Image (cartoon, helix red, strand yellow):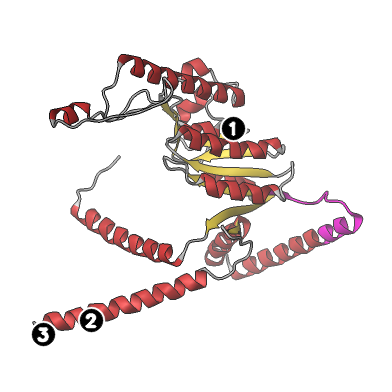
Amino acid sequence: MEFLSDYGLFLAKAMTVLVVFVIVLALIANSKQKGSSDKGYISVTSLNEKFESYTDTIKSAVLESHVLKLEHKLKKKRDKQQRRQEKQAEKSGTDGVRRKRVFVLNFDGDIKASAGNNLREEITAVLGLAQAEDEVVVKLESGGGMVHSYGLAASQLTRIKERNIPLTVCVDKVAASGGYMMACVADKIIAAPFAVLGSIGVVAQLPNFHRLLKKNDIDYELFTAGEYKRTVTMFGENTDKGREKFRDDIEKTHVLFKDFVSEHRPVVDIDKVATGEVWYGRKALEIQLIDDIKTSDGYLLDQYPDADIYAVEFTQKKSLPEKLGLAAETAVDGIATRWIEKASPKRWF
């Protein structure tokens, strides 16, 4: 019993220290940040600096000291010349020497396209500066979801096109259904060789518990105004007429989906691809669902020598209870994941 008492006291102390630590971190994170608003804040990271840091690290380990010194000397000379050109352009009132800017956004979509809220803020921020000679790159991953949610997310991307700013969508893993509806808005779609594209179709399903309720003598009453206010239900007895109307609504949604893809990507044979099927990257290229085979990392690295690349991210502000809950959830997920990895047999693709 004494051991259990001591152990309980130890756990209480440890939890107290952990809670205090998390609260301090949350308060620091909640302090005023650059580009902040009531909803959240925008953060911008120079990917050029990231790439240069990687290159410098490799060079310092591989090159001889005299070669490394020469590299630094040449870089300083190039930077000095670039600054001189920028100052001359500023004095003359021109912007002719400005390098192309590439703004990189991330969209990791769930069934509700929740990332669309952040995407909206990021696009608004970018449109305040981006010009026609620049480019917006969206790294998109989504297997689709709710029609109206992905319709809104796709509409956010059209804001970029309306300003005549080139838009490129990069797909490393999957852009299917609503994800592809977003991707097809772009001027250019790039995908990894085994990325999943397509699934231009509509699906809806729901269970029906009417017979179970009837078996247990439970009545379910539904009151509507309007012949088709409710076509099929989970608890009532569905009719052939209701099912037919529901199927008709799905078909109309599919037609809207096909029209949207045809409008934004007319090179696609819509009758051939709008079957609900999916294709891997190389086959998707053959049927013109995409324009090139390449990873997002490869595409951005190709831009690196001639453009200034910036990753733009909107972070929503969270209340202290939300931050504490998220920290606890992350810790539990980490423990569960490690346990499953140890307990489960290895599987390979």
Left/right placement of residue 166 relative to residue 291 reads right
Residue 128 in the image: state x and y as whole percent.
71, 50
Q: Does the magenta stretch include residue 255?
A: no
Q: Is residue 86 magenta?
A: yes
Residue at the spot of label 3: 2
Residue 76 in the image: state x and y as whole percent.
73, 66
In terms of secondary structure, where does tag 2 sit? Answer: helix
In terms of secondary structure, where does tag 3 sit? Answer: helix
Q: Name the N-terminal-most of marks 3 and 2.
A: 3
Image quarter (top left, top right, bottom left or bottom right) of the C terminus: top left
Which three-letter amino acid code belongs to the residue tagged 1?
Val
Residue 282 in the image: state x and y as whole percent.
47, 29
Front position among marks 1 and 2: 2
Left/right placement of residue 15 relative to residue 78 reads left
Confirm or deny contact between disc 1 and disc 2 (CB under 8 A): no
Q: Which residue is drawn at 60% across and 34% down?
A: 186
Residue at the spot of label 2: 10
- Against 296, is 187 above or below? above
Residue at the spot of label 1: 185
Q: Which residue is drawn at 86% across and 55% down?
A: 89
The boundaries of the magenta stretch are 84-102
Front position among marks 1 and 3: 3
In terms of secondary structure, where does tag 1 sit? Answer: loop
- Against 104, is 315 above or below? below
The span from disc 1 to disc 3 (Cα, nearest Å) is 68 Å
Q: Residue at x 61, y 23 (%)?
A: 263
